[in-house]
Protein backbone atom coordinates (compact mmCIF):
# COMPACT_ATOMS: atom_id res chain seq x y z
CA UNK A 1 0.00 0.00 0.00
CA UNK A 2 1.50 3.27 -1.17
CA UNK A 3 1.66 5.48 1.86
CA UNK A 4 1.70 2.93 4.65
CA UNK A 5 4.29 0.85 2.93
CA UNK A 6 6.81 3.53 2.11
CA UNK A 7 10.24 3.21 3.63
CA UNK A 8 11.66 5.69 6.08
CA UNK A 9 12.82 8.87 4.39
CA UNK A 10 16.52 9.10 3.78
CA UNK A 11 17.58 12.40 5.20
CA UNK A 12 21.02 13.85 5.35
CA UNK A 13 20.79 16.31 8.16
CA UNK A 14 24.48 16.94 8.70
CA UNK A 15 25.21 19.07 5.65
CA UNK A 16 22.45 21.58 6.08
CA UNK A 17 24.24 24.13 8.26
CA UNK A 18 27.04 24.70 5.84
CA UNK A 19 24.90 25.20 2.78
CA UNK A 20 23.73 28.61 1.75
CA UNK A 21 21.30 28.94 -1.06
CA UNK A 22 22.30 31.25 -3.86
CA UNK A 23 19.04 33.07 -4.06
CA UNK A 24 19.47 34.43 -0.57
CA UNK A 25 22.37 36.72 -0.78
CA UNK A 26 21.20 39.12 -3.45
CA UNK A 27 17.84 40.29 -2.14
CA UNK A 28 19.22 40.46 1.38
CA UNK A 29 22.14 42.60 0.39
CA UNK A 30 19.99 44.83 -1.78
CA UNK A 31 17.44 45.14 1.01
CA UNK A 32 20.06 46.21 3.49
CA UNK A 33 21.55 48.73 1.08
CA UNK A 34 18.14 50.28 0.68
CA UNK A 35 17.74 50.31 4.42
CA UNK A 36 21.02 52.09 4.90
CA UNK A 37 20.13 54.64 2.24
CA UNK A 38 16.68 55.20 3.63
CA UNK A 39 17.61 55.20 7.29
CA UNK A 40 18.28 58.89 7.59
CA UNK A 41 15.33 60.01 5.52
CA UNK A 42 12.26 61.56 6.97
CA UNK A 43 9.19 62.62 5.07
CA UNK A 44 7.89 64.99 7.74
CA UNK A 45 9.94 67.81 9.07
CA UNK A 46 13.47 66.53 8.64
CA UNK A 47 15.92 68.15 6.26
CA UNK A 48 15.24 66.82 2.79
CA UNK A 49 17.92 64.46 1.68
CA UNK A 50 18.14 62.89 -1.73
CA UNK A 51 16.92 59.34 -1.75
CA UNK A 52 16.95 56.82 -4.47
CA UNK A 53 13.55 57.01 -6.19
CA UNK A 54 11.29 54.13 -5.30
CA UNK A 55 11.46 51.29 -7.86
CA UNK A 56 8.98 51.81 -10.70
CA UNK A 57 6.65 49.05 -9.55
CA UNK A 58 6.23 50.87 -6.23
CA UNK A 59 5.38 54.35 -7.45
CA UNK A 60 1.83 53.91 -8.73
CA UNK A 61 -0.97 52.56 -6.61
CA UNK A 62 -1.01 48.83 -7.27
CA UNK A 63 -4.14 47.52 -8.96
CA UNK A 64 -6.91 46.97 -6.46
CA UNK A 65 -7.01 43.21 -6.98
CA UNK A 66 -3.28 42.62 -6.70
CA UNK A 67 -3.60 40.73 -3.45
CA UNK A 68 -2.80 37.19 -2.31
CA UNK A 69 -5.12 35.42 -1.64
CA UNK A 70 -7.23 36.83 -4.48
CA UNK A 71 -10.25 38.68 -3.09
CA UNK A 72 -13.69 37.30 -3.91
CA UNK A 73 -14.96 40.50 -5.57
CA UNK A 74 -12.99 43.51 -6.76
CA UNK A 75 -14.60 46.64 -8.24
CA UNK A 76 -11.94 49.17 -9.14
CA UNK A 77 -12.97 52.76 -9.71
CA UNK A 78 -12.81 56.28 -8.43
CA UNK A 79 -9.91 58.19 -7.00
CA UNK A 80 -7.14 56.59 -5.03
CA UNK A 81 -6.56 57.42 -1.39
CA UNK A 82 -3.20 58.54 -0.08
CA UNK A 83 -2.15 58.09 3.53
CA UNK A 84 -0.46 61.26 4.74
CA UNK A 85 1.08 62.73 7.87
CA UNK A 86 -2.36 63.82 9.04
CA UNK A 87 -4.13 60.47 8.51
CA UNK A 88 -5.99 59.05 11.50
CA UNK A 89 -7.10 55.50 12.10
CA UNK A 90 -10.70 55.80 13.27
CA UNK A 91 -12.22 52.87 15.08
CA UNK A 92 -15.98 52.71 14.91
CA UNK A 93 -17.52 49.88 16.90
CA UNK A 94 -20.23 49.13 19.40
CA UNK A 95 -19.12 49.15 23.02
CA UNK A 96 -18.97 45.35 23.09
CA UNK A 97 -16.60 45.23 20.16
CA UNK A 98 -14.60 48.32 20.74
CA UNK A 99 -11.62 46.75 22.52
CA UNK A 100 -11.04 44.26 19.73
CA UNK A 101 -11.46 46.93 17.08
CA UNK A 102 -9.02 49.21 18.88
CA UNK A 103 -6.50 46.42 19.12
CA UNK A 104 -6.74 45.86 15.38
CA UNK A 105 -6.41 49.61 14.81
CA UNK A 106 -3.26 49.66 16.92
CA UNK A 107 -1.92 46.64 15.09
CA UNK A 108 -2.44 48.43 11.78
CA UNK A 109 -0.80 51.58 13.12
CA UNK A 110 2.13 49.45 14.31
CA UNK A 111 2.53 48.06 10.79
CA UNK A 112 2.41 51.47 9.09
CA UNK A 113 4.25 53.83 11.45
CA UNK A 114 7.88 52.73 11.03
CA UNK A 115 7.96 52.94 7.23
CA UNK A 116 5.66 55.93 6.72
CA UNK A 117 7.06 57.84 9.66
CA UNK A 118 3.55 59.17 10.35
CA UNK A 119 1.96 59.36 13.79
CA UNK A 120 -1.28 57.65 12.68
CA UNK A 121 -3.20 58.15 15.92
CA UNK A 122 -5.90 55.58 16.66
CA UNK A 123 -9.08 57.32 17.71
CA UNK A 124 -12.62 56.17 18.47
CA UNK A 125 -15.96 57.33 17.13
CA UNK A 126 -17.54 58.34 13.87
CA UNK A 127 -16.03 60.79 11.48
CA UNK A 128 -15.02 60.94 7.90
CA UNK A 129 -11.73 60.53 6.19
CA UNK A 130 -8.61 58.66 7.06
CA UNK A 131 -8.58 54.94 7.63
CA UNK A 132 -11.85 53.85 9.17
CA UNK A 133 -12.31 50.45 10.81
CA UNK A 134 -15.97 49.61 11.29
CA UNK A 135 -16.88 46.55 13.31
CA UNK A 136 -20.32 45.09 13.91
CA UNK A 137 -21.79 45.49 10.45
CA UNK A 138 -25.21 43.91 10.10
CA UNK A 139 -24.34 42.67 6.61
CA UNK A 140 -24.73 38.94 7.05
CA UNK A 141 -23.07 38.17 3.76
CA UNK A 142 -19.72 39.10 5.29
CA UNK A 143 -19.88 36.10 7.63
CA UNK A 144 -17.38 35.51 10.40
CA UNK A 145 -14.26 36.33 8.46
CA UNK A 146 -15.35 38.56 5.60
CA UNK A 147 -14.84 42.29 5.15
CA UNK A 148 -15.49 45.11 2.74
CA UNK A 149 -12.84 47.63 1.76
CA UNK A 150 -13.94 50.90 0.18
CA UNK A 151 -11.29 53.26 -1.03
CA UNK A 152 -11.73 56.74 -2.47
CA UNK A 153 -10.27 60.22 -2.33
CA UNK A 154 -11.55 60.91 1.17
CA UNK A 155 -10.35 57.76 2.85
CA UNK A 156 -10.46 54.04 3.09
CA UNK A 157 -13.09 52.20 5.11
CA UNK A 158 -12.93 48.61 6.27
CA UNK A 159 -16.20 47.07 7.39
CA UNK A 160 -16.69 43.67 9.04
CA UNK A 161 -19.09 41.79 11.26
CA UNK A 162 -16.39 40.18 13.38
CA UNK A 163 -12.85 41.07 14.45
CA UNK A 164 -11.44 38.31 12.21
CA UNK A 165 -12.95 40.03 9.18
CA UNK A 166 -11.51 43.38 10.14
CA UNK A 167 -8.12 41.79 10.67
CA UNK A 168 -8.17 40.07 7.27
CA UNK A 169 -9.23 43.38 5.72
CA UNK A 170 -6.17 44.98 7.28
CA UNK A 171 -4.00 42.37 5.53
CA UNK A 172 -5.57 43.33 2.22
CA UNK A 173 -5.10 47.03 2.91
CA UNK A 174 -1.48 46.37 3.69
CA UNK A 175 -0.92 44.53 0.42
CA UNK A 176 -2.45 47.41 -1.53
CA UNK A 177 0.33 49.68 -0.28
CA UNK A 178 3.84 49.61 -1.76
CA UNK A 179 6.04 46.75 -0.61
CA UNK A 180 8.34 49.21 1.14
CA UNK A 181 5.62 49.78 3.72
CA UNK A 182 6.86 46.52 5.26
CA UNK A 183 10.31 47.94 6.00
CA UNK A 184 10.96 48.81 9.62
CA UNK A 185 12.70 52.11 8.90
CA UNK A 186 11.35 55.26 7.28
CA UNK A 187 10.77 54.95 3.54
CA UNK A 188 9.70 57.24 0.76
CA UNK A 189 6.00 57.21 -0.16
CA UNK A 190 3.63 58.02 -1.65
CA UNK A 191 1.39 55.66 0.32
CA UNK A 192 -1.42 55.33 -2.16
CA UNK A 193 -4.28 52.85 -2.24
CA UNK A 194 -6.21 52.42 -5.50
CA UNK A 195 -9.85 53.51 -5.54
CA UNK A 196 -12.73 51.05 -5.56
CA UNK A 197 -14.42 48.35 -3.49
CA UNK A 198 -13.34 44.87 -2.43
CA UNK A 199 -15.88 42.52 -0.90
CA UNK A 200 -14.21 39.42 0.38
CA UNK A 201 -15.13 36.21 2.20
CA UNK A 202 -13.26 32.89 2.44
CA UNK A 203 -14.01 29.75 0.47
CA UNK A 204 -13.08 27.47 3.39
CA UNK A 205 -13.37 27.99 7.13
CA UNK A 206 -10.21 25.96 7.77
CA UNK A 207 -6.98 27.37 6.32
CA UNK A 208 -4.11 25.89 8.21
CA UNK A 209 -0.36 25.62 8.52
CA UNK A 210 1.40 22.98 10.58
CA UNK A 211 4.78 23.39 12.19
CA UNK A 212 6.72 20.36 13.43
CA UNK A 213 8.50 21.66 16.52
CA UNK A 214 9.49 18.15 17.55
CA UNK A 215 12.09 17.07 14.98
CA UNK A 216 13.79 20.43 15.52
CA UNK A 217 12.60 22.60 18.33
CA UNK A 218 11.49 26.11 17.38
CA UNK A 219 11.62 28.85 19.98
CA UNK A 220 8.63 30.97 20.94
CA UNK A 221 9.98 33.87 18.91
CA UNK A 222 10.53 31.69 15.85
CA UNK A 223 6.93 30.51 16.06
CA UNK A 224 5.66 34.07 16.53
CA UNK A 225 7.56 35.17 13.45
CA UNK A 226 5.90 32.41 11.44
CA UNK A 227 2.50 33.39 12.86
CA UNK A 228 3.02 36.94 11.60
CA UNK A 229 3.91 35.62 8.16
CA UNK A 230 0.88 33.32 8.08
CA UNK A 231 -1.45 36.15 9.07
CA UNK A 232 -0.41 38.17 6.01
CA UNK A 233 -2.01 35.47 3.86
CA UNK A 234 -5.16 35.01 6.00
CA UNK A 235 -4.22 31.57 7.36
CA UNK A 236 -6.41 30.98 10.41
CA UNK A 237 -5.18 27.73 12.02
CA UNK A 238 -1.77 26.95 13.44
CA UNK A 239 -1.33 23.23 14.01
CA UNK A 240 1.63 22.57 16.31
CA UNK A 241 3.11 19.07 16.09
CA UNK A 242 4.19 18.99 19.74
CA UNK A 243 5.48 15.46 20.15
CA UNK A 244 7.26 12.85 18.10
CA UNK A 245 10.00 10.27 18.46
CA UNK A 246 12.70 12.92 18.65
CA UNK A 247 11.21 15.27 21.23
CA UNK A 248 8.30 16.10 23.54
CA UNK A 249 7.78 19.86 23.45
CA UNK A 250 5.07 20.78 25.97
CA UNK A 251 5.27 20.74 29.77
CA UNK A 252 2.84 18.29 31.40
CA UNK A 253 2.70 18.69 35.19
CA UNK A 254 1.52 15.16 35.92
CA UNK A 255 4.27 13.58 33.79
CA UNK A 256 7.17 16.02 34.18
CA UNK A 257 9.85 13.88 32.55
CA UNK A 258 8.07 14.10 29.19
CA UNK A 259 9.35 17.63 28.64
CA UNK A 260 12.36 17.65 30.97
CA UNK A 261 13.88 14.46 29.55
CA UNK A 262 11.81 13.66 26.45
CA UNK A 263 12.31 17.23 25.24
CA UNK A 264 16.05 17.29 25.80
CA UNK A 265 17.18 16.49 22.28
CA UNK A 266 16.19 16.65 18.61
CA UNK A 267 17.19 15.35 15.18
CA UNK A 268 20.96 15.40 14.90
CA UNK A 269 21.38 15.42 18.69
CA UNK A 270 21.02 19.12 19.53
CA UNK A 271 19.66 20.31 22.87
CA UNK A 272 16.00 20.37 21.82
CA UNK A 273 13.71 22.27 24.17
CA UNK A 274 10.09 22.54 25.20
CA UNK A 275 7.42 25.14 25.95
CA UNK A 276 6.51 25.80 29.55
CA UNK A 277 2.79 26.18 30.08
CA UNK A 278 3.23 29.95 30.31
CA UNK A 279 5.10 30.00 27.00
CA UNK A 280 2.46 27.87 25.31
CA UNK A 281 -0.29 30.18 26.62
CA UNK A 282 1.66 33.14 25.33
CA UNK A 283 1.87 31.50 21.89
CA UNK A 284 -1.84 30.77 21.91
CA UNK A 285 -2.71 34.35 22.76
CA UNK A 286 -0.23 35.76 20.24
CA UNK A 287 -1.79 33.53 17.58
CA UNK A 288 -5.27 34.69 18.65
CA UNK A 289 -4.17 38.32 18.26
CA UNK A 290 -3.41 37.40 14.62
CA UNK A 291 -6.74 35.55 14.31
CA UNK A 292 -5.14 32.11 14.29
CA UNK A 293 -6.47 29.23 16.36
CA UNK A 294 -3.81 26.90 17.75
CA UNK A 295 -4.43 23.18 17.25
CA UNK A 296 -2.06 21.18 19.43
CA UNK A 297 -1.05 17.69 18.32
CA UNK A 298 0.20 14.88 20.50
CA UNK A 299 1.02 12.10 18.06
CA UNK A 300 -0.29 8.71 19.31
CA UNK A 301 0.15 5.73 19.55
CA UNK A 302 3.21 5.71 17.22
CA UNK A 303 5.77 8.53 16.99
CA UNK A 304 6.12 8.23 20.76
CA UNK A 305 9.75 7.35 21.44
CA UNK A 306 10.33 10.55 23.43
CA UNK A 307 7.52 9.57 25.83
CA UNK A 308 8.56 5.92 25.95
CA UNK A 309 12.14 6.98 26.78
CA UNK A 310 10.87 9.21 29.58
CA UNK A 311 8.69 6.63 31.37
CA UNK A 312 9.62 2.93 31.39
CA UNK A 313 6.10 1.92 32.47
CA UNK A 314 4.64 3.09 29.15
CA UNK A 315 6.55 0.32 27.36
CA UNK A 316 5.03 -3.16 27.03
CA UNK A 317 8.28 -4.68 28.28
CA UNK A 318 8.73 -2.08 30.99
CA UNK A 319 12.10 -1.00 29.60
CA UNK A 320 12.66 2.59 28.49
CA UNK A 321 14.43 2.92 25.12
CA UNK A 322 17.14 5.55 24.66
CA UNK A 323 16.27 8.98 23.30
CA UNK A 324 16.21 9.07 19.49
CA UNK A 325 17.85 11.64 17.22
CA UNK A 326 17.53 9.99 13.79
CA UNK A 327 14.81 10.43 11.17
CA UNK A 328 13.18 7.03 10.77
CA UNK A 329 9.47 6.65 11.39
CA UNK A 330 7.16 3.85 12.48
CA UNK A 331 9.28 2.09 15.10
CA UNK A 332 7.67 3.23 18.36
CA UNK A 333 4.31 2.47 19.97
CA UNK A 334 2.54 3.05 23.23
CA UNK A 335 1.42 -0.20 24.87
CA UNK A 336 -2.28 -0.52 23.97
CA UNK A 337 -2.82 -3.36 26.45
CA UNK A 338 -1.70 -1.51 29.57
CA UNK A 339 -4.09 0.63 31.63
CA UNK A 340 -1.34 3.09 32.51
CA UNK A 341 -1.29 4.05 28.82
CA UNK A 342 -4.80 5.48 29.13
CA UNK A 343 -4.01 7.22 32.43
CA UNK A 344 -1.15 8.85 30.56
CA UNK A 345 -3.32 9.88 27.59
CA UNK A 346 -6.01 11.17 29.94
CA UNK A 347 -3.56 13.32 31.89
CA UNK A 348 -1.88 14.72 28.81
CA UNK A 349 -5.14 15.49 27.01
CA UNK A 350 -6.69 17.00 30.16
CA UNK A 351 -3.77 19.36 30.71
CA UNK A 352 -3.44 20.28 27.05
CA UNK A 353 -7.19 20.83 26.62
CA UNK A 354 -7.16 23.14 29.65
CA UNK A 355 -4.39 25.21 28.04
CA UNK A 356 -6.03 25.42 24.65
CA UNK A 357 -9.07 27.64 24.02
CA UNK A 358 -9.57 26.36 20.45
CA UNK A 359 -12.01 23.57 19.71
CA UNK A 360 -9.64 21.03 18.17
CA UNK A 361 -7.15 18.56 19.63
CA UNK A 362 -5.08 16.48 17.24
CA UNK A 363 -4.07 12.98 18.33
CA UNK A 364 -1.95 12.00 15.32
CA UNK A 365 -2.57 8.34 14.60
CA UNK A 366 -0.25 8.19 11.57
CA UNK A 367 2.37 5.58 10.71
CA UNK A 368 1.65 3.36 13.69
CA UNK A 369 3.56 0.57 12.00
CA UNK A 370 4.61 -0.97 15.31
CA UNK A 371 1.08 -1.22 16.64
CA UNK A 372 -1.07 -4.17 15.50
CA UNK A 373 -4.25 -3.20 13.67
CA UNK A 374 -6.37 -4.56 16.50
CA UNK A 375 -4.45 -2.59 19.10
CA UNK A 376 -4.57 0.52 16.91
CA UNK A 377 -8.35 0.40 16.63
CA UNK A 378 -8.79 -0.23 20.36
CA UNK A 379 -6.34 2.51 21.25
CA UNK A 380 -7.87 5.11 18.94
CA UNK A 381 -11.33 4.34 20.33
CA UNK A 382 -10.21 5.13 23.85
CA UNK A 383 -8.01 8.10 22.91
CA UNK A 384 -10.87 9.72 20.96
CA UNK A 385 -13.24 9.22 23.90
CA UNK A 386 -10.76 11.01 26.14
CA UNK A 387 -10.52 13.97 23.77
CA UNK A 388 -14.31 14.23 23.73
CA UNK A 389 -14.48 13.95 27.50
CA UNK A 390 -12.38 17.11 27.74
CA UNK A 391 -14.65 18.95 25.34
CA UNK A 392 -12.51 18.96 22.23
CA UNK A 393 -13.12 17.94 18.63
CA UNK A 394 -10.89 15.04 17.55
CA UNK A 395 -8.49 15.59 14.68
CA UNK A 396 -6.30 12.75 13.42
CA UNK A 397 -4.19 12.00 10.38
CA UNK A 398 -6.31 10.09 7.85
CA UNK A 399 -5.16 6.69 9.15
CA UNK A 400 -7.80 7.39 11.78
CA UNK A 401 -10.33 6.32 9.16
CA UNK A 402 -8.86 2.80 9.44
CA UNK A 403 -10.18 2.79 13.02
CA UNK A 404 -13.58 4.18 13.98
CA UNK A 405 -13.66 7.99 13.86
CA UNK A 406 -16.00 9.38 16.50
CA UNK A 407 -18.89 11.62 15.55
CA UNK A 408 -17.61 15.02 14.49
CA UNK A 409 -14.02 13.85 14.04
CA UNK A 410 -11.83 15.53 11.44
CA UNK A 411 -9.34 13.51 9.40
CA UNK A 412 -6.30 15.17 7.87
CA UNK A 413 -5.63 13.60 4.49
CA UNK A 414 -1.94 13.45 3.61
CA UNK A 415 -1.99 10.94 0.78
CA UNK A 416 -0.41 11.61 -2.58
CA UNK A 417 -0.74 10.46 -6.14
CA UNK A 418 0.61 7.02 -5.30
CA UNK A 419 -1.79 6.48 -2.42
CA UNK A 420 -3.69 3.28 -3.10
CA UNK A 421 -7.33 3.21 -4.14
CA UNK A 422 -8.31 1.19 -1.08
CA UNK A 423 -6.93 3.85 1.22
CA UNK A 424 -8.74 6.64 -0.64
CA UNK A 425 -11.96 4.64 -0.60
CA UNK A 426 -11.65 4.14 3.15
CA UNK A 427 -11.26 7.89 3.61
CA UNK A 428 -14.26 8.50 1.35
CA UNK A 429 -16.36 5.97 3.28
CA UNK A 430 -15.56 7.80 6.51
CA UNK A 431 -16.73 11.07 4.99
CA UNK A 432 -20.03 9.44 4.07
CA UNK A 433 -20.40 8.54 7.74
CA UNK A 434 -19.83 12.19 8.70
CA UNK A 435 -16.07 12.60 9.10
CA UNK A 436 -14.84 15.85 7.57
CA UNK A 437 -11.50 16.31 5.88
CA UNK A 438 -8.66 18.75 6.01
CA UNK A 439 -6.60 18.26 2.87
CA UNK A 440 -2.81 18.15 3.06
CA UNK A 441 -1.82 16.10 0.01
CA UNK A 442 1.87 15.38 0.49
CA UNK A 443 2.85 15.92 -3.13
CA UNK A 444 1.07 19.30 -3.22
CA UNK A 445 1.30 21.06 0.10
CA UNK A 446 3.98 19.32 2.18
CA UNK A 447 6.30 22.28 2.59
CA UNK A 448 9.22 19.99 3.38
CA UNK A 449 9.15 18.49 -0.12
CA UNK A 450 11.97 19.75 -2.33
CA UNK A 451 11.03 22.15 -5.14
CA UNK A 452 13.29 20.35 -7.59
CA UNK A 453 16.45 18.29 -7.62
CA UNK A 454 18.59 21.30 -6.74
CA UNK A 455 16.77 22.07 -3.51
CA UNK A 456 19.22 21.51 -0.70
CA UNK A 457 16.79 21.12 2.20
CA UNK A 458 13.79 18.88 2.55
CA UNK A 459 12.82 15.43 1.34
CA UNK A 460 11.47 14.01 -1.90
CA UNK A 461 9.54 10.88 -1.00
CA UNK A 462 6.31 12.36 -2.36
CA UNK A 463 8.08 13.92 -5.35
CA UNK A 464 9.34 17.39 -6.15
CA UNK A 465 6.82 20.15 -5.60
CA UNK A 466 7.39 23.36 -7.53
CA UNK A 467 5.28 26.42 -6.83
CA UNK A 468 2.80 25.69 -9.63
CA UNK A 469 2.17 22.15 -8.42
CA UNK A 470 1.51 23.36 -4.86
CA UNK A 471 -1.07 25.84 -6.19
CA UNK A 472 -2.66 24.13 -9.14
CA UNK A 473 -5.20 21.68 -7.74
CA UNK A 474 -8.75 21.89 -6.52
CA UNK A 475 -9.58 20.91 -2.93
CA UNK A 476 -13.25 20.47 -3.80
CA UNK A 477 -12.57 17.75 -6.37
CA UNK A 478 -9.24 16.36 -5.20
CA UNK A 479 -10.79 13.16 -3.84
CA UNK A 480 -13.96 13.24 -5.91
CA UNK A 481 -12.99 10.11 -7.85
CA UNK A 482 -12.90 8.17 -4.59
CA UNK A 483 -16.34 9.54 -3.70
CA UNK A 484 -15.56 12.46 -1.38
CA UNK A 485 -18.25 15.13 -1.73
CA UNK A 486 -17.34 18.82 -1.82
CA UNK A 487 -19.04 19.58 1.45
CA UNK A 488 -16.93 17.00 3.30
CA UNK A 489 -13.92 19.26 2.80
CA UNK A 490 -13.37 21.61 5.72
CA UNK A 491 -10.32 23.17 4.17
CA UNK A 492 -6.60 22.84 3.52
CA UNK A 493 -3.44 22.76 5.57
CA UNK A 494 0.23 23.04 4.65
CA UNK A 495 2.44 21.02 7.00
CA UNK A 496 6.11 21.79 7.50
CA UNK A 497 8.04 18.81 8.85
CA UNK A 498 11.42 19.76 10.20
CA UNK A 499 13.75 16.78 9.91
CA UNK A 500 16.00 18.99 7.74
CA UNK A 501 14.90 22.42 8.93
CA UNK A 502 16.64 24.21 11.80
CA UNK A 503 16.57 27.98 11.34
CA UNK A 504 13.82 30.45 10.46
CA UNK A 505 15.60 31.25 7.20
CA UNK A 506 15.46 27.58 6.25
CA UNK A 507 11.81 27.37 7.26
CA UNK A 508 11.02 30.42 5.14
CA UNK A 509 12.83 29.08 2.09
CA UNK A 510 10.60 26.00 2.12
CA UNK A 511 7.32 27.69 3.09
CA UNK A 512 7.66 30.66 0.75
CA UNK A 513 6.46 31.06 -1.86
CA UNK A 514 4.38 27.85 -1.71
CA UNK A 515 2.44 28.79 1.40
CA UNK A 516 0.70 31.84 -0.14
CA UNK A 517 -0.60 29.51 -2.87
CA UNK A 518 -2.09 27.13 -0.33
CA UNK A 519 -3.56 30.12 1.50
CA UNK A 520 -5.17 31.19 -1.78
CA UNK A 521 -6.62 27.72 -2.34
CA UNK A 522 -8.19 28.00 1.09
CA UNK A 523 -9.49 31.55 0.77
CA UNK A 524 -10.26 32.50 -2.82
CA UNK A 525 -13.31 31.43 -4.83
CA UNK A 526 -12.63 28.61 -7.30
CA UNK A 527 -13.57 31.04 -10.10
CA UNK A 528 -10.44 33.13 -9.45
CA UNK A 529 -8.16 30.10 -9.71
CA UNK A 530 -5.70 30.50 -12.55
CA UNK A 531 -1.97 29.83 -12.42
CA UNK A 532 -1.12 32.51 -14.99
CA UNK A 533 -2.78 35.37 -13.18
CA UNK A 534 -1.77 33.96 -9.82
CA UNK A 535 1.90 33.89 -10.73
CA UNK A 536 1.95 37.63 -11.45
CA UNK A 537 0.15 38.40 -8.22
CA UNK A 538 2.66 36.16 -6.46
CA UNK A 539 5.52 37.91 -8.23
CA UNK A 540 4.32 41.19 -6.72
CA UNK A 541 4.74 39.58 -3.30
CA UNK A 542 8.47 39.20 -3.95
CA UNK A 543 9.52 42.73 -2.93
CA UNK A 544 7.09 42.54 -0.01
CA UNK A 545 8.60 39.30 1.27
CA UNK A 546 12.06 40.78 0.82
CA UNK A 547 11.07 43.87 2.80
CA UNK A 548 9.75 41.62 5.53
CA UNK A 549 13.00 39.66 5.59
CA UNK A 550 11.28 36.49 4.38
CA UNK A 551 13.93 34.33 2.81
CA UNK A 552 11.82 32.95 -0.03
CA UNK A 553 12.80 30.62 -2.84
CA UNK A 554 13.06 32.51 -6.12
CA UNK A 555 11.28 29.95 -8.20
CA UNK A 556 12.11 30.31 -11.92
CA UNK A 557 8.42 29.77 -12.66
CA UNK A 558 7.44 33.13 -11.17
CA UNK A 559 8.10 36.44 -13.01
CA UNK A 560 9.65 38.22 -10.02
CA UNK A 561 10.20 41.93 -10.66
CA UNK A 562 13.84 42.82 -11.30
CA UNK A 563 15.77 44.40 -8.45
C1 LIG B 1 5.41 11.67 7.01
S1 LIG B 1 2.75 12.78 7.16
C2 LIG B 1 5.08 11.88 8.34
C3 LIG B 1 6.02 12.60 9.20
C4 LIG B 1 7.30 12.96 8.51
C5 LIG B 1 7.01 13.40 7.10
C6 LIG B 1 8.22 13.86 6.36
C7 LIG B 1 2.73 12.15 8.47
C8 LIG B 1 1.45 12.17 9.09
N1 LIG B 1 3.86 11.60 8.91
O1 LIG B 1 6.28 11.85 10.35
O2 LIG B 1 7.91 13.97 9.21
O3 LIG B 1 6.41 12.34 6.39
O4 LIG B 1 7.91 14.35 5.10
Image (spheres, rainbow, N blue to C red):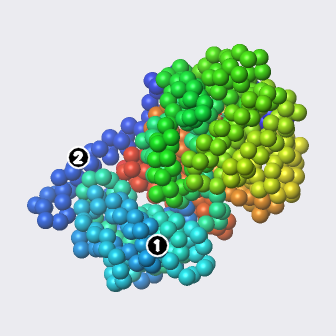
Q: Are marks 1 and 2 in contact (CB under 8 Å)?
A: no
Report if residue 52 is visible in the image: no
Near-viewer residue (116 or 530): 116
Q: Give the residue displayed 61% in from the left and 39% down from the top.
A: 241
Say above or below: 290 vs 196. above
Q: Which residue is mark 2?
A: 36
Number of residues whose C-alpha sits closer than 10 Å to that of mark 2, classed few (under 14), some (14–19) or many (20 or more): few
Number of residues whose C-alpha sits closer than 10 Å to that of mark 1, classed few (under 14), some (14–19) or many (20 or more): some
Q: Quadrant of ligand 1?
A: top right
Q: Position of residue 453 (x, y in %)?
A: 61, 33
Say above or below: 137 vs 402. below
Q: Which residue is mark 1?
A: 97
Q: Residue 121: which quarter of the image?
A: bottom left
Circle 1 SS class: helix
Quarter of the figure with the N terminus: top right
> Mark 1 against mark 2, which lies toward the viewer?
1
Q: Give the residue displayed 71% in from the left and 22% down from the top.
A: 313
Say above or below: 360 vs 71. above
Near-viewer residue (561 or 149): 149
Q: Number of numbered discs present?
A: 2
Alpha carbon separation for disc pair 1 and 2: 41 Å
Q: Residue 351: which quarter of the image?
A: top right
Say above or below: 384 vs 88. above
Left or right of residue 546: residue 469 = right
Q: Position of residue 419 (x, y in %)?
A: 81, 41
Amino acid sequence: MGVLGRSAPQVRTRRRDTLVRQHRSFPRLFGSLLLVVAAGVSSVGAAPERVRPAPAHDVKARPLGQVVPAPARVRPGGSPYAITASTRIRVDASRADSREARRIGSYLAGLLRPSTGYALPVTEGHGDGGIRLRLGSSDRSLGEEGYRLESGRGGVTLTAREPAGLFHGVQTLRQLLPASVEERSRQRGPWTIAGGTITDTPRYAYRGAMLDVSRHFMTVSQVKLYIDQLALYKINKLHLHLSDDQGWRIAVDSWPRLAAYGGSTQVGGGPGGYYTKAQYRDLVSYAASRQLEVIPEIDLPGHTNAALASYAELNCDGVAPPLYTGTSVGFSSLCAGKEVTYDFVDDVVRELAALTPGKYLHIGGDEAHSTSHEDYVAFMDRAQAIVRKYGKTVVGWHQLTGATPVKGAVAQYWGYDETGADERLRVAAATKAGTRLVLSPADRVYLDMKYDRNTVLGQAWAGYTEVDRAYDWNPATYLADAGVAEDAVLGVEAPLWTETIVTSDQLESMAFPRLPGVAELGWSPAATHDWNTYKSRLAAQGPRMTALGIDYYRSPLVPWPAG
